[in-house]
Image (cartoon, rainbow, N blue to C red):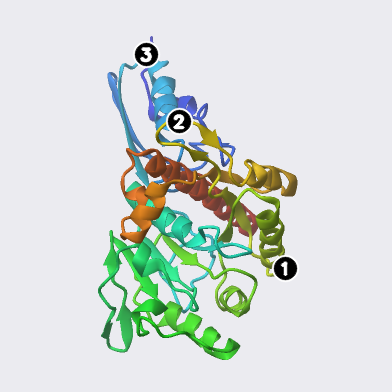
Amino acid sequence: MENKLSPEIVLNALKAVKDPDLHRDIVSLGFIKDLVVTDSRVAFTIQLTTPACPVRDQLAAQARQAVQALGIRDVDVRLTSAVMGGRPGKIELIPNVKNTVAVASGKGGVGKSTVAANLAVALKRAGASVGLMDTDVYGPSAPILMGGSSAPAVVEGKSGPPGEYGIKLISMAYFLPKDEAVIWRGPMLHKTIQQFLGDVRWGELDYLIMDLPPGTGDIQLSLSQTIPLTGAVIVSTPQDLALTVAAKAIAMFQKLNVPILGIVENMSYYVCPKCGHREDIFGHGGAREAANKLGFPFLGEIPLDINVRVQSDSGKPVALDEATPYGKTFQEIAGALAAQISIANFQKEQEISIE
């Protein structure tokens, strides 16, 4: 008598599908949910660790093929996500934030804030809940990049961050007259960081992206000592000078036990819009080479283009439009970043289970 198809047979077939980042099969990872099996149809949900998963379509296709190989043609594969958080306990200041990501650079002028804003937008467009915290007290620019004009509303002593493109945003620019400079010492900067974390109604967030000021100063130290960071993204341009200074930012995070999630090369190359000629104005590939040498993930490269500058100045991040080359680039980098966050969180989870 022919054996009927059972959930056990289907799950066994799905064990052939492995997550390329976590290096485990999707069954043992617990990704398979709501499995329904009949003689002629199989339906299930793959619950990913992030909506920005760069291999989501690949996993769905492989899972469908694995079940169809059992002789079932009608296979309904649905995709959903539940973002992993890497902290075993809750953080008092931001108890409902799953992941905190610092976007940093060793020096100014490398486009770090533009990268941070567009990564936040790309993650949001992928389906994640996202906040953007502008910690660059001396030169806050996030509201300009995000088109933010509404000041935070204070309710019961806490600030409600304005929502720009669905992203909760806080910045010192909201609290200072336009042309006033901040001249503060370390204690005031530390207090500001604590207020941006604990006195803001962040709510439930999958990712809180933090745009750090250039260098290795008080704000970086205060942030790292105030909350456990999921990790840091290092932004650099290709030339040797920028990479040399970026290495100092990496060294700082390593001393503070903050994982490096990856390196982004900004202003990587320029393509003439009229003739199509490519010019590597600042060199090319230096950040990728540095990432490989240091053993960190290379998240991607962003071209130097006037559209990025124009849209940033007008408060419309290029990541809003995935149909453009720049929107697609940021979507790919955000996916690579989300994958690295999932890997870091999975490794922490494994370490905790072993202990």
Disc 1 element: helix
In this rendering, is residue 276 above or below 245? above
Secondary element at tag 3 = loop
First in sequence: mark 2 or mark 3? 3
Nearer the observer, 257 or 149: 149
Q: Is residue 103 left or right of residue 294?
A: left
**Quadrant housing residue 317:** bottom left
Identified by mark 2, the residue type is: Gly
The N terminus - image quarter: top left
CA distance for labels 2 and 3: 50 Å
The residue labelled by disc 1 is 255
Q: What SS does tag 2 mark?
A: loop
Q: Position of residue 144 (x, y in %)?
A: 35, 66
Of residue 104 and residue 178, the one placed in the foreground of this image is: 178
| Residue at 49% over, 66% down | 211
- Image position of 295 (left or right of 75): right
Between marks 3 and 1, how big is the CA–CA gap?
55 Å
**In the rendered image, which residue does mark 3 sit on?**
71
At a point 46% along the width and 39% down the height, the residue shown is 54
Of the image marks 1 and 2, the number of the one nearer the N terminus:
1
Residue 70 visible, this angle: yes
